[in-house]
Amino acid sequence: MLVISLLVVVLDNTILNVALRTLADPVRGLGASQGELEWSINSYTLVFAGLLFTFGVLGDRAGRRRMLLIGLALFGLASLLSAYAQSPAQLIAARALMGVGGAAIMPATLSIISSVFDPRERGRAIGMWASAVGLAVAIGPILGGLLLEHFWWGSVFLINVPVVAFGVLLVALLVPESRDPAPGRIDAFGVLLSVVGLVTLTYGIIDGGEHGFGRPLVWAALLGGLGVLGWFVWYERRSSHPSLDVRLFRMPRFAAPVAMIGLVFFAAMGVMFFSSFYLQLVRGYSPLQTGLLFLPFAVAQLFFAPRSAAMVRRYGARAVSTVGLVLTAVALGAFAFVDAATPIWVVLVFFFLQGAGMASIMPPATESIMSALPREKAGVGSAISNTIRQVAAALGVAVIGSVLAAGYRAGIGPALADLPPAAREAAGESIAGAYAVAGQLGPAAPGLVAAADDAFVSAMHWSAALAALVAAAGVLVALRWLPGRPGPVTPPPVGEPELAGAA
């Protein structure tokens, strides 16, 4: 049941990746710019990340099952609003409300696992929980492609509603209630600081990538966001009830896997953002075909994630995570050598390697984070793990998307000199805009399309190289701070069940 609850959250983001091209279309979609597309992703992830701490504590206090039910209901309502949005601004607002629901769902699922399963079973349960991400990655793009080929773009959000209704019914019937016997107070001011700081910083990154970093407003947003986040850290260190207990990061067993998760999702989500445009525009695949091309990533996740706990027991978290990080960095960096003529089977191999790598990182990292805290604080551990992941994903889309936008603008510039001002602005903003302009140029269209493809591929190379370097930094973290191979386990005395259970 907890896997189904997680599926609805992850499913939405994987479907959205396939729908980005359609949402950018002024006829079939909403005519969203690249910046608006980034905000349709980041409005969800930033609200999600900003509220995870609060909902983690609320779930520990009021009941995790109750919080899960509230989150599912909010997520379903926001999905309905997203499906019928009439403008990019309405979609961004509805996605932010979906982030509120997701923030209530995600920590509740992981903290319920930590309270229901004892330590002997917890690693395997978390491995299955993590493999649900792979299942959602498998289902999401294919389901999104099918819906976009037969229905309007809003159907990719409407599909969440029956899943949520099914989830609410099963949660009410099957999931036991649990709570922290000594819950903490709500840190409202800390949550406000984190949300303001993250939104301001991300706005500066996205706006600078879309319109250039030479304007005072961009630097005011960047420096202001960093300043507010610094204030947040200072405040949390002195608070008696912090939403983010920064002292936890002094423990290598906690801090190292959190850093690994952040680095991997920063890199991977940035690459996933431009992969959809590469496959649908540069390579000309339909939404359904694009969804099927993401399948190797999902298959690798489904196969390797449930087996990671056994691999950690045999080889140690350091070895398993290092191999996963190396595979991920190689797969992401390989896109720096992909162009419009690369055989598609080569791209599929890269997706598979990325899926295998991430599946080898997430379960041991999550288990290390959760086991570093007492069971009654499971909501806090889950909130921190998921917050870092979502913040990193939002910043990855913003930063790597901005590198992509800046590289594309520089590459396409010479080909736009003879276009009218309005067409020049649209074509210079994104590859989707260039394709829309090309549809109205007649005989000159193939030249603009070719220039847009070349500019996009060149910008994609620089973005992939940045992503690979970020993922490679995770290798250094794993080698330096993660524990090595586990030592031998002394068998419990025969005939003494109390000691056996303690062991």
Image (cartoon, rainbow, N blue to C red):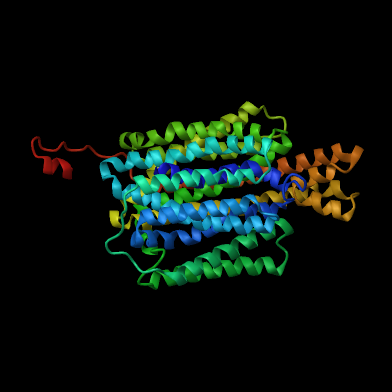
Residue 209 location, x and y as percent?
69, 56
Instruction: Note whether residue 359 is visible.
Output: yes
Residue 332 location, x and y as percent?
57, 40
**Residue drawn at (76%, 39%), measured in percent from left and top?**
453
Residue 11 location, x and y as percent?
53, 43
The image shows a total of numbered marks equal to: 0
- Along the viewing direction, whichever of 344 and 152 lies nearer the viewer: 152
Quarter of the rendering containing residue 330: top right
Residue 421 location, x and y as percent?
87, 55
- Along the viewing direction, whichever of 285 and 478 lies nearer the viewer: 285
Which quadrant is the C terminus positioned in? top left
Relative vertical location of residue 139 with respect to residue 118 in this rendering, above or below: above
Decide if residue 52 is on the left or right side of residue 91. left
Relative vertical location of residue 303 with respect to residue 473 in this rendering, above or below: above
Decide if residue 467 is on the left or right side of residue 433. left
Quarter of the rendering containing residue 255: bottom left
User: Residue reaching furthest left?
Assistant: 495
- Along the viewing direction, whichever of 192 and 282 lies nearer the viewer: 192
Which quadrant is the N terminus positioned in? top left
Relative vertical location of residue 356 with respect to residue 97 in this rendering, above or below: above
Quarter of the rendering containing residue 244: bottom left
Instruction: Note whether residue 45 is visible.
Output: no
**Residue drawn at (45%, 70%), measured in percent from left and top?**
188
